[in-house]
Amino acid sequence: MVKIVAIGEPMIELNAMTVGKLRDVTYFEKHVAGAELNFCIAAKVNGVDCSLIAKVGDDEFGYNVIEYARGKGVDTSMVKVDPKLPTAVFFIQRGYPVPMRSISFYYRKGSAGSSLSPSDIDVSKIREADLVHTTGITLAISDSAKEAAMEGLRNSRKSSLDTNIRLKLWSPEKARETLLKVIPEVDILVTDPDDARIIGNVSEPDEAFSFFSKMGVSTLVYKTGIEGTYVYHEGEKFVQRGYHVQVEDPTGAGDSLSGTFISLLLKRKSVDYALSHAVASATLVVTTRGDNEIIPDEESAEKFLKEFK
Ligand code: CKP
Ligand code: MG
């Protein structure tokens, strides 16, 4: 059975029910999110077991995260409950100032999740896994979480990283410095032109592949939005165009794309199949609030690809 271990902070998402400035929003809808948990859910929906290594607070939101993740079939046996620190929360402002875009406002400083450290990493579980996944968010939230993620990557048989640079969490310089150190540990890299510009001053897909492959990356997933997602894998280049849909909230689309693509690749599906399903998944995620509820299984993604033009 193929198995993934993901390392990162799950969070409670409070998503604005209406478009506009958060100060004017009255109603928020609660979801459970966090990049690595979203990734795990996408893997599980696609039939790949996923365990999350994380910490939450001993509070209602912490138990909400654990019960939700468990309900989605994610293995939470390595999610620890911190007796003192709170579960992190973030709010999503939608459609302002740019229509169809969202902005996240974090309440995560000093959270249980950011206190994750190498002692929370069970190296034997890491060595057993087919793949270890993390993101630039875990590298940014604290030094101890970064060390935990590094411990996971270093001991993995195979690894993937989504650069996910959040400039609210660190400066471009710090992001660049850290990611240049971490990327050489990674087999599959997921990134986009904004992040690639920060890391290597590159933006064109071929240029980005040349830059990252020199750092040891063997597979590159390069997301350029509606224009398409590129994959460079075993000497071949693949591209899947995006689909025009009504955007409600794009948050989580990247994680559903990477979780779907990587889990299907681990299941030995073809790159074309995995990539088209990944884009189908991301397309559905942007049509609704919440990061992971709408991620399609293989059969539904097939239906999407057949019927939605
Ligand atoms: O890159 P994505 O939009 O797929 O990531 C969304 C997640 O972990 C979201 O759930 C949020 O909690 C976060 O990224 C984050 O920390 O920004
Ligand atoms: Mg992303």
Image (spheres, grey):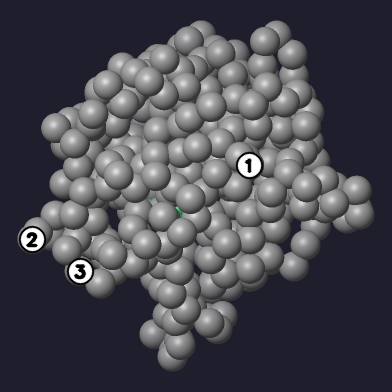
User: Mark 3, residues whose alpha carbon is within 10 Å: few (<14), some, or many (≥20)?
Assistant: some
Closer to viewer: mark 1 or mark 2: 1
Instruction: Kindly identify which numbered label has been placed on residue 46.
Output: 1
Could you tell me the amino acid type at mark 2? Lys
Looking at marks 3 and 2 on the same chain, the residue that comes earlier in the sequence is marked by 3
Q: Secondary structure at mark 1?
A: loop
Q: The N terminus lies in which quarter of the figure?
A: top right
Which one is nearer the viewer's eye here, 272 or 105? 272
Looking at marks 1 and 3 on the same chain, the residue that comes earlier in the sequence is marked by 1
Q: Looking at this view, name the residue that lies furthest to the left.
A: 84
Question: Could you say where residue 141 lies in the image, as x and y percent from the top left?
Answer: 25, 46
* Residue to which mark 2 is pinned: 84
Question: Could you say where residue 99 lies in the image, as x and y percent from the top left?
Answer: 63, 70
**Image check: 102 left or right of 244?**
left
Label 1 vs label 2: CA separation? 35 Å
Residue 47 in view of the camera: yes
Label 3 vs label 2: CA separation? 9 Å
Could you tell me the amino acid type at mark 3? Asp
Is residue 218 depicted above or below 43 in this figure? above
- Tell whether label 3 touches label 1 (CB within 8 Å): no
Instruction: Kindly identify which numbered label has been placed on residue 168.
Output: none
The residue at the point 16 percent across, 46 percent down is 115
Q: Secondary structure at mark 3?
A: loop
* Residue to which mark 3 is pinned: 59
Question: Could you say where residue 20 lies in the image, as x and y percent from the top left?
Answer: 52, 81
Looking at marks 1 and 2 on the same chain, the residue that comes earlier in the sequence is marked by 1
